[in-house]
Each structure stands twice: as C-alpha cells, then as structure tokens.
Amino acid sequence: MKEVGRLETAVEALLARDGVELDFRETVDVVSFVFAWKPNPVARVVIKGLARFMRPLEQGSYDGKRITGEPNRASWVIASPLNIFIMQRASYWQKIVLAARLRHAGEINVVEVGPAGGKSGNRSAKSLKNFERQTRSDEKGPDRLEELIRIQRKSDVSLTVVPVARTSHQLTPNSASASAVIRAYRILPQNIIRKAFSCAHMLRTGRVKNCRPFVLSKWCESRDGLELSEQSAILRRELMGNIESQQRACAGPPAVPTREAKRRVLADPVLASYMQEYALDRCATREAVLDEAQSYVDEIASDYRVGVVRWFARAVDILFDRFLTDLEVDRAGIQFLSECDSRSRLILICSHKSYVDPLLIGYALFHSGMVPPHQAAGRNLDFWPVGWLLRHSGAFYMRRTFAGETLYTEVFSAYVRYLLAENYITVIYIEGTRSRDGKLAKPKTGLLEIFADSMKMGICQEIKLVPTYLGYEKVPEENAHVKEMAGGKKVSESVKGLGRIYKSMNTKLGRAYVKFGPPLSMKPTVDTAELEAAALAACESINNVTPITARSLAASSILATTTTWVSVAEARGAARTLLDFARSRGCPMAVDADMDGVIAAIDWFASEGHVSRDSRDGEDGLSVDGNGRRFLEYNKNIPLNHFLDASLDAIASRGCEPRAQHENLAFLRDLLDEEFVFGAAEERSTALLDESVDEKRVIASLLESYVEGYTVAARAAGMICDGSISRDDFVERCFAEGELMLSEGAITRQEAVSKTMMMNAARRFVVLGALEQRREKAKGHRDRVLLSKGPRFDEIALIEERLHQL
C-alpha cells in the first residue's frame, strides 16, 4: 500500500504542474494508473481462448451476405493505451469478454458509468494484489469522468472515448416481472429453450457492442469555460444516452409476453373511457364491448420472436440470392438510427413498391445488427403462412379503411400509443398501398395523425420521421403492376397469388436499395398543425434520395420518341442527355448509371421481350409495341421526380413568350397535383432551361405521356351526362376514348392510356370542382365511387383545349 501511495502522489504531482502539459509517455502512464484493468494470469488464458472464436470488436459491423454501401468494411476498434472504454456496468466477466473481442490480453482502460453515479472504484495499480482487491470492492471512489477530463485538460495528446453497450440484436431483454403470471410464463420450457438458442447465437459477440468513438480533446474544446463538475455531468449524460440509444436500436425495448402487451393496450385510459361511452351508446354490456375490443387487439397486435426472425432471415437470404445481385444500404442512415437520442421515437416513412418491402427493410436492419422494426401492414396480408411470419417478425395489421369502425379506430390508436410508449422503432408506408406506376404516390396521413395525437397526449416528447426509399432495379411485381396500368384487375393477396408473382420473375431483379433521407422533427408539425406539409416534406426527401438506375435511363431514352421504332444511336443520345443533366444537378446515381450500364439495360429489356432488335436501312434500332411501352413507362417513372421541374419547364416553354410560359407552368403544376409531390412552393424551380432544342425535347418527353393522358381523361369526363357514372366505368370509357384518339392521331403514346393515371385525373377533376364524387354502399361488396357533373364542369373543355395547345 505504501507503493500505491507513492504512485498516487507521483500522479497528482504530474497533474498539478502549472503551465506544463503531459507528453505522450506521461499521459499513457497516468491513464494506465487511473483507468487500466490488468487481467491476472488465469484471465489472460481465458481471454486468449475466447479470442479464437469471438468476433473482433468493430465500428460498423454488418453481417448480410449481399449488403454493400459506404463504408464497405468495418473499422476495427483496438486497445490503444489512449483509448478509454466506457461501460454501464464493468463486471469481471464483461471485462474479459471486452478484452477477448479486442484481441488483447494486456491492460485495457475501462471506466464504469452506471446510473447510480458512475463513481465505482475501478482503479488498478500495476502488480499489486492488494490494490486489485481494493478495485473489486464496492467502495465508492472519486468521479472517474472528472479524472478523465482533468487528464485530457493537462495532456497535449488526445484521448479517444469508446462507449460500449451490453446488447445484441439476437436477444430482446425481458421487462421487469410485474406479476407472478409473467414470472411463471418465463420459466415455461419453450421460453427457456428460446432463451438458450438466443444465448448460443451470442457466443461470438458476448452481447458487447461499441458505439461510435469520439475524441475527448475536441469534446472538451466545444465546452470550454465550464467547471469540471459540469463537464463531467454533461459527459455522463451523453455517454449514457449513446449507450441507451445503441441498446434501443440493437435489442429494442424490454419484451413483455404478448398477453401482457394486449392487456396494457386494453388498459389504456383513453380507450377505457371510450369503451364506457360506446357501451352506453350501443346499450351493450361492458363484457361484450371488452370482448369486441379484445378481438380487435388480437387482429392488430404483433408478436415479435427473435427466433422466427433468425430463421426467416435465412430464408430471405436464399430468396435474395435467387433474385438480387446486390443490396445497397445507406450506412449513414443506419448510423443515425443507432445513435439517435433514445428519448426520441423513430418512425421510418417508407416508399412502397413491392410485397418484398417489409422483408427488405427488416433484413437490412437485422443484418446491420439492429432489431427489426415494427411495421404497419395491410390486413390483406394476414393469411397463412405470410401473416404468421410477418406478425412474428414485428408486423402489426391495420384495415384499409376505418370508416364507421369507431371502436376499432380507438383500439388501433391505443396500440400505436403503446408502441410509442415502449419506444419501438416503427415503419409506416406513407403511400398507403403499393405504387402501381413506379413513382411515389401522394401521401396518406391517417396513421401520421394518430402519431401526432399521441404526441399531443404526452406519450413522448419528440418523434423523428426518417424518410426511407425502398427500391429495386426491377420491381418484383412489375408484370402485375403493368397489367393494372393497362386496365387489368389487381392480383388478390393469397399464397396462390404470390406464387404467380414468384413464377413471373423469370430474371434477376438487379440491385435493391435502402436509402435514408435527412430526419424530420414531428414536434414543429404538431405545434403548427401542418401534418400534410410534413408528409409532403417526407415524400420529397424520399424522392431526393431515389437513385437513378441504368434501367430507368434506358427506358426513358427509348421513350424519348413517339414512334414504335427508334435507332440505337438516337436512344444513346437521349440517354447521354439525361445522364449529363442528372450529373450536373447532383442527383443520386446508381453504380451502373453510365453509358455501359444503359446499353446493358437495353439488352435486359430485350431479353425480357419488352423491346426487340430491328435493323432498318442498315441502321441498328429497337422496336417497341404498346405493352412494351407500358413496361418502359413504369421504369421511367421511378426516378422521374429528379427531372420533374425541368420537364415541366420544357413543356411549358414550347412556342410561347416567357409570360405565357409561367402561366402554362402554373397550369401544369395545378393539374398534375395528384400525380407528383412538388414540395414547398418556395423551393420549386422555375428557372428556364438553357439546353439546346434537342436536349429540351428529350427532357420534355418524360412528361409527354401525362399531358396526353390527361387530355384523354378530360375528353372522357366531358362526355358525362346529367346522371352519374361509376369511377370504374369512367376508367373504361377513358380507355375506349384513348384507343380512338390513338387511331385518329390525336395522341401518339399508348402508355398515356393508364388506369392509374385516369384514376388520378378523376380525383383531380373532383378537387377542381369539375366533377362531384359520392360513395354508394353495396352489401357484400366494396363501396362504389360515383362521379357526376360538378359546379365547374364547363372548365373540363378548357383543360382539354389547353392541353392540346401544349
């Protein structure tokens, strides 16, 4: 102990020197004396043995077979003498596991900062057994973070702080046992077996996961002028916040039995109050209303099981190996999800193009070391075995419409409040259904309203909306969607229906993409009651991160002409124009988005039969029939928003003065409001294009199909008589009129006659007051939507005339 006292005196003397900074060697000695944990000989043998099969500790570890993106490789974390590892609880075995994953059997610097105050005495002295026994005692020592900051202030070298969380995406922690029933549930044989399997999968990681390291000297400089105790308190809060955020992202909130979760939903005070009113209004007994609410909870609630997810991920591995060439994940977005303040709730606002989307986002997060999110899924997917797999992977189900279902609405809202209160990461698909024409559809805000109302009730202080693009070079349901564009019926959700979609995928789908936009705060939206604006901002952000692929460029270049035959040279010229335009404006580009990729994509379309090689007069060319043009239109639409403003400008400026151009531009934006997300008015670009005439023609061709399609819709709407017509019959009339106009030469693009476009046009005419809409209930069938003349019906003829002029 005398030697320990002499060492402490020497350290204090070094730190007390005025005007003299510690050099590298002195800093290492002081840090080692204050923070180093030195394993004994037995511990060193154990560490070396564990290091043989445990994974090394790393920053940015991702396990997916086909996950790529920046950074492609993990950066290793090492046991440098200037690295300080921060742990909530630094038990003896946790230090051994940390050392094994660091591949280091010597000294490591460890600081424990538990919720109790972080003053545990983990100081060790070299080769002194008595002092080691003292470090293992429960006596409180000086504040280690204050000592750490004090050393950094006196040193001319930088210390690196590495927060370490005890967590794993292979095991969800148990919640506190609130009742004997829960305690009994946890000792059931099946639960013990599940826990054993989860522990077996964690042997290579030991539930040790590091957060992002940071340089302490820079941290201190940014908080210069504060007292040592104030800096220590701030640092402790930040470190604990980092660790808790990593635990939330990696393992999720503590799991409760499904029965207990449903009980908590039914015990929601807002729901309980409403059920009393509901029983009085319906003259029903409390038990009957409770049974009805219980049935709704059973229909809605998820039942997450990490074992199912683990085996499901292996099945998805096989599926993705069969159809995908690569999976590109935005690493910066994954990092944000891992590090976002755990006090903020995370809602991923996703685009929706395919039934595969829930698998894609869950797979990407799970193989990035995170717990799969809870996802809002349509009840139409709740059929065996898909419904069972999705429910046990975190999906909760919702009906397409809540109209007239007041108790169901309240139960669903109570379940959403439960998810927010428990701090689950949640996924919602902002379009409400899959996009049928490739581009992002207008947002549906119903679910966002429930989140906003929950926030107003004080369930949470902040919600972060994370715009997320989920996409593919070739959408799995492309064939089914194009059939619907051509007027076909939707394929029903069933094992047989999904089997037909699976069989129709006769080629590889190329790359899949998971891209994250800048997060948005929901709190200002709630305060200003501008939920629609927040939804549009999220959609605009999704459009901004949508990558432009070679397949979309190839489709756009072939459709740049209205003829059924285009020369290869002309298609290449159009593709080069689009490439130069996208690059000059900094649009996100896929790795294959170059001329070689475009040529390969044209060959891809030819192999699928959508285009055919056809030489005329000695010139190589491509022939495209009507249905092939619809396939190309679908692929062209995916990144269309990157070219939207320029294409509108090009169309609006054709053969007119600047003043008329601005009027045409305003007219087109207003008319196509149901088709595109234009974003905030002040952010819209109205600058004229300065490209050549040929380049303007290529850019304008991207929206020609919409101009012609709305011309067809306007003519069909103008034929509505004094009675009413169902919306389905209106779409059929549009197709008949479109075929007639094609034969007469009034329009030239067969892809302009699209079911999705005609439906959107009808909605827009209703908003403009040219048509009126009402719903008619039909027993045993879905509601019929009826259209009739509106107060501004005469304007339809003016719309058609103006579109002809463009």
Image (tube, rainbow, N blue to C red):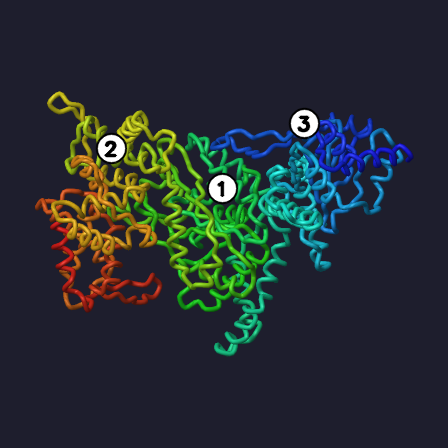
Mark 3 residue type: Phe
Q: Compare marks 1 and 3 and give the one earlier in the sequence.
A: 3
On the image, numbered disc 2 is attached to which residue? Answer: 577
Q: Which mark is residue 53?
A: 3
Mark 1 residue type: Gly
Residue at 34%, 61% (x, y): give it. 782
On the image, numbered disc 1 is attached to which residue? Answer: 333
**Mark 2 surroundings: few (<14), some (14-19) or many (≥20) residues within 10 A:** some
Mark 2 residue type: Thr
Determine the secondary structure under disc 3.
Answer: loop
Residue at 73%, 30% (x, y): give it. 28
* Observer-nearest of 53 and 649: 649
Q: CA distance from mark 1 to mark 2?
A: 31 Å
**Mark 3 surroundings: few (<14), some (14-19) or many (≥20) residues within 10 A:** few
Could you say where residue 647 lies in the image, as x and y percent from the top left?
Answer: 23, 43
Q: Is residue 146 above or below residue 182?
A: above
Residue at 25%, 64% (x, y): give it. 786
